[in-house]
Image (cartoon, helix red, strand yellow):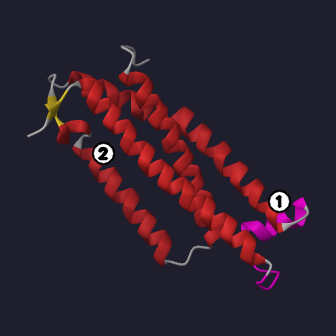
Amino acid sequence: MIKLKHKSLITIAGFVWLCIGVGLLSQGLHLIIEKAAFHELEERGGSSLLSFFADYSGGIQQAGMILIAIALFIGYFKSRFVLAKTVRKMVVRIRQLPNPSPLYKIYSLAFYIVIAAMMGLGIIMKVTGIPTDIRGLIDVTVGSALINGALLYFKYAYTSETT
């Protein structure tokens, strides 16, 4: 059984969030950009976020940029006001474990359940046919929030504070 010091466990937790965040961010950007690139080929008048913003921004590419900016903005605030509290709680929890501790204790059982539920939601979004620009918006939002959360993990790993 692998046992690691608190700093290592916190860093690994951050890398997990960073990897998932980068994956979601790149997938979301791809979905939005792909939808914007091929939207010209589709029939106008469809009900999508890109169509809505294109009517006000002067074009589909500008609408894609607006959608990405909105997602990054929401992701920032999600990480700042929601995920920051989660990261803080997780770091406090890790620091209360014996030092060193087993790797599997990096997250609580409840958090593993939340991870499984989030994966399930992602699969449901994929199979239910939610428009790609909306999926892209959600992926960019969550991905950017997770990346910001990962940076907090790294900060806490190399400082003694958690407030």
Residue 73: image location, x then y, percent? 67, 43
In the image, 156 versus 109, the foreground residue is 156
Q: State the SS at label 1.
A: helix
Measuring from the top left, give residue 69's x and y in whole percent. 72, 49
Q: In this view, does 132 lie above or below 69?
A: below
Instruction: Inspect this view and state whether residue 93 appears.
Output: no
Which residue lies most toward the left here? 1
Q: Check if residue 44 falls in the magenta segment.
A: yes
**Which residue is rendered at x = 50% and y = 50% of the image?**
22
Three-letter code for the amino acid on which mark 2 is drawn: Phe
Left or right, 101 with reference to 48: left
- Which quarter shows the N terminus? top left
Report which quarter residue 93 is drawn in: top left
Image side of residue 30 versus residue 116, left or right: right
Range of residues picked out in magenta:
41-57
Q: Determine which residue is flagged by label 1.
A: 62
Residue drawn at x 48%, y 55% as measured from the top left: 23
In the displayed structure, 74 sits above or below 11; it is: below
N-term mark: 1 or 2: 1
Q: Mark 2 points at which residue?
A: 111
* Secondary structure at numbered mark 2: helix
Query: Which quadrant of the structure image shows residue 77?
Result: top right
